[in-house]
């Protein structure tokens, strides 16, 4: 009675993984086919089968504060493009603002002043634990919409902050209405403030972690060589800290770009808000969602590519 | 040690070490005083808290039918009892460490001053006092007699929570002889907590599976997981919620698509799973590959090696990031208000649209911010406590 030396097929180390994958893949295919089948059937019944020709129809709604000229007679694709440009505008301004504020707060955590250190900590803990959307509606409804208008507006040299917006470049009060070379709306102001304040808290943590990752011996050695604190920071600490900071910044920048889609809460016409209006008018759900997902994916990839470039620049160069 | 001169020296070193430090300190103190007094003056003399006091029920449970609200009270009582039981058994030995005393004092203060400040009716105030008393009494009793109970019974205690969750679901939505309350009538804090807890519970196992899939040697599994995670992480949550509300109805055969509230809950779950997967993956990466190899060469099958050797160690590393994702998820529930659901923020918007309370934005948003801040900070504190408890190198494990 000799037992067979051949391994039975169900214990075959090479066959089984492929069999499992095959079954799993087949299952996924069946589910996808089922969903897509339903989608096609339901869309056909609703008369909404995938088509892009509606993009050339006149939009019929207005998009406020666009950089590109826009009016209600222009087609849908121009409206969506105007929304995309608005999104890019607030993202770009937000990236710069959040980086500056976040770096300041992150560095404040290393101040020799105990009060400043603790305040930086309080800022981060306060902001991170309150939902961004709540902060946005707070900035819009409580702060920016409560600004005084007319003569009571907050006036600084060259800048006026009024209920109707932020005016830059020699603003003047003409017939009770402010006029300036550049006007930013309160909607833009509230969204930008909210995004900058929120993202800065996260960037501050990234910066703090980066600076903390530089061993204290580096500070001490540099100081004992006679470099000033500023020189130490500039020449010794930052180049080493940046290697840790840049990858962390990348993910914070991407979340800022994605978070800009909450603009609809403070009435700013970004891509999402234009897309929502477009869907309500045309009913083209699938196309609109595809455009939305695609646009944000491209923005994310752009930021990632940019930050990867920065990253390869700050990494250690072998000489 | 604590002589005044010493603390004065310390103060001087901390705040006035150099002239520049002195200037910064004075400027900051002036700024804080100005902001503090302005805020206090607003809070005490200008703010009108009637908008909160008149709408407490709406903020708590939305339009949940009044004659069915006893079910939610019952659930609160059960939750308080279960919390007290777990708390007492975790501490054991009938002792009240300093943190526990502090927590108890905070709870009592909340029950007394919270319900007084909200101007609740007396019977409802009394209910909150009773619930707080029940929690503390159960905690005391569980701590006192935990030693006397047989060990097998004690091991069953954690099971109270999943059972309670299911009971809670039945109590909230009805069925089994209770009148049905459709999800459209849930709102306020109830809806926020329900969506958040549902998504947190389900996204965790899903995220662990995705993280394991991403590190699997099987190409189909790996690329499938990578594709899913990167797709979800590349899109803003609001577009995915939008997708759930507008396209899910087309994807499923007519009538099978879930209610709007459940659609949002599933979208939140699938969204958070991708982020949890990345958090868990950071733990898996930190684990030396020798751990899995050793477990496998000891003859453990793959699933046992993962469950008993790899995951417990990886989760210890991944815990802070995972809880961080849960906190984000709780905050993300506010986005439901943008797709027309009446979560806390959505309810706040309907309240402020009421002409009687027009322009009371600051009061409402402040209360919501405090509420969210407390929940998120508590989760963060809990995570840190769990971290020290799980740390094998912690000295307190003697």
Image (cartoon, coloured by chain):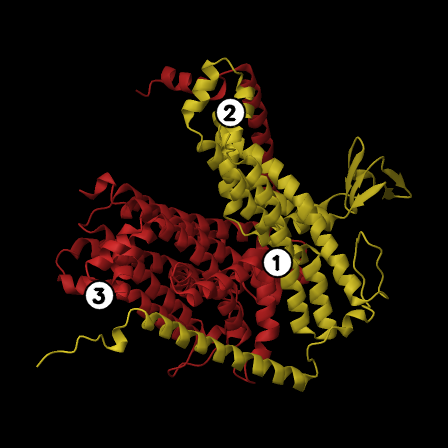
Q: For this view, does B353 lie left or right of residue B86?
A: right
Q: Earlier in the sequence, mark 2 or mark 1?
A: 2
Whether labels 2 and 3 share one chain: no
Q: Which chain is yellow?
A: A
The chain letter for the residue carrying disc 3 is B
Q: Nearer the viewer, residue A211 or B47?
A: A211
Q: Secondary structure at mark 2?
A: helix
Which mark's residue is nearer the viewer, 3 or 1? Answer: 1
Q: Position of residue B18 (x, y in %)?
A: 52, 15
Q: Position of residue A3 (x, y in %)?
A: 13, 78
Name the residue at 55% across, 40% down: A311
Which mark's residue is nearer the viewer, 2 or 3? Answer: 2
Q: Secondary structure at mark 3?
A: helix
Name the residue at 49% across, 38% down: A244
Question: How far, Cα to Cα, is label 2 from label 3?
Answer: 57 Å
Image: A176 above or below A47: above
Q: Nearer the viewer, residue A184 or B226?
A: B226
Tint applied to chain B in the drawing: red
The chain letter for the residue carrying disc 1 is A
- Residue most toward the left? A1
Q: Is residue B250 visible?
A: yes
Q: Position of residue A296 (x, y in %)?
A: 63, 58
User: Mark 3 sits on what residue?
Assistant: B156
Mark 2 neighbour density, 10 Å: few (under 14) some (14–19) many (20 or more): some
Question: How far, Cα to Cα, is label 2 from label 1?
Answer: 37 Å
Q: Which mark is residue A297?
A: 1
Image: B339 above or below B374: below
Which quadrant of the rendered structure holds the N terminus of chain A?
Answer: bottom left
User: Mark 2 sits on what residue?
Assistant: A236
């Amino acid at each position: 009675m000799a037992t067979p030396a051949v391994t039975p097929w169900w214990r075959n180390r090479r066959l089984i993984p492929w069999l499992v994958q095959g079954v799993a893949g087949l299952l996924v295919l069946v589910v996808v086919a089922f969903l897509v089948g339903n989608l096609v059937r339901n869309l056909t019944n609703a008369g909404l089968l995938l088509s892009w020709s509606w993009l050339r129809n006149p939009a019929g709604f207005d998009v406020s504060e666009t950089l590109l000229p826009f009016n209600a007679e222009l087609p849908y694709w121009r409206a969506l493009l105007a929304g995309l440009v608005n999104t890019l505008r607030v993202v770009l301004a937000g990236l710069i603002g959040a980086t500056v504020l976040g770096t300041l707060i992150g560095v404040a955590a290393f101040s020799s002043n105990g009060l400043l250190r603790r305040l930086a900590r309080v800022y981060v803990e306060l902001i991170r634990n309150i939902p961004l959307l709540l902060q946005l509606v707070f900035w819009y409804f409580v702060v920016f919409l409560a600004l005084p208008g007319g003569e009571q507006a907050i006036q600084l040299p060259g800048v006026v902050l009024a209920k109707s917006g932020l005016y830059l470049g020699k603003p003047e009060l003409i017939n009770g209405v402010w006029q300036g070379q550049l006007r930013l709306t309160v909607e833009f102001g509230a969204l930008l403030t909210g995004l900058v304040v929120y993202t800065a808290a996260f960037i501050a943590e990234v910066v703090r972690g980066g600076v903390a990752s530089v061993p204290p011996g580096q500070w001490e050695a540099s100081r004992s060589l006679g470099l000033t604190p500023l020189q130490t920071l500039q020449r010794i600490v930052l180049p080493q800290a940046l290697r840790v900071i840049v990858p962390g910044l990348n993910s914070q920048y991407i979340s800022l770009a994605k978070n800009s889609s909450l603009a609809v809460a403070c009435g700013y016409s970004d891509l999402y808000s234009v897309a929502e209006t477009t869907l309500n008018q045309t009913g083209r759900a699938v196309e609109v969602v595809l455009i939305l997902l695609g646009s944000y994916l491209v923005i994310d990839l752009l930021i990632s590519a940019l930050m990867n470039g920065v990253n390869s620049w700050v990494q250690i160069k072998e000489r | 040690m604590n002589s005044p001169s010493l603390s004065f020296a310390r103060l001087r070193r901390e705040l006035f070490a150099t002239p520049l430090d002195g200037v910064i300190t004075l400027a900051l103190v002036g700024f804080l005083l100005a902001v503090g007094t302005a805020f206090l003056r607003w809070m005490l003399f200008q703010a009108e808290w009637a908008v909160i006091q008149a709408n407490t029920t709406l903020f708590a449970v939305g339009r949940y039918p009044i004659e069915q609200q006893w079910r939610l009270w019952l659930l609160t009582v059960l939750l308080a009892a279960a919390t007290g039981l777990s708390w007492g058994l975790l501490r054991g030995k009938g002792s009240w460490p300093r943190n526990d005393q502090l927590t108890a004092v905070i709870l009592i203060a909340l029950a007394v001053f919270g319900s007084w400040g909200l101007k609740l009716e007396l019977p409802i105030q009394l209910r909150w006092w009773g619930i707080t008393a029940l929690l503390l009494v159960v905690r005391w009793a569980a701590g006192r007699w935990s030693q006397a109970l047989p060990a097998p019974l004690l091991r069953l205690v954690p099971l109270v929570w999943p059972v309670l969750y299911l009971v809670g679901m039945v109590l909230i939505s009805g069925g089994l002889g209770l009148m049905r309350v459709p999800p459209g009538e849930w709102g306020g804090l109830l809806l926020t907590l329900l969506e958040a807890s549902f998504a947190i519970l389900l996204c965790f196992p899903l995220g662990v599976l995705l993280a394991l899939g991403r590190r699997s040697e099987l190409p189909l599994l790996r690329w499938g997981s990578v594709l899913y995670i990167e797709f979800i992480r590349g899109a803003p949550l609001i577009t995915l919620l939008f997708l759930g509300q507008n396209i899910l109805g087309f994807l499923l055969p007519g009538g099978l698509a879930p209610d709007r509230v459940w659609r949002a809950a599933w979208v939140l779950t699938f969204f958070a799973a991708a982020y949890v997967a990345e958090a868990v993956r950071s733990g898996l990466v930190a684990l030396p590959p020798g751990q899995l190899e050793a477990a496998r060469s000891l003859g453990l099958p793959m699933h046992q090696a993962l469950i008993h050797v790899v995951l417990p160690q990886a989760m210890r590393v991944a815990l802070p990031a995972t809880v961080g994702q849960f906190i984000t998820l709780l905050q993300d529930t506010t986005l439901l208000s943008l797709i027309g659901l009446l979560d806390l923020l959505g309810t706040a918007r309907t309240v402020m649209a009421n002409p009687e309370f027009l322009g009371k934005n600051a009061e409402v948003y402040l209360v919501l911010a405090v509420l969210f801040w407390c929940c998120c900070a508590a989760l963060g504190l809990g995570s840190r406590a769990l971290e020290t408890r799980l740390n094998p190198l912690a000295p307190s494990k003697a």
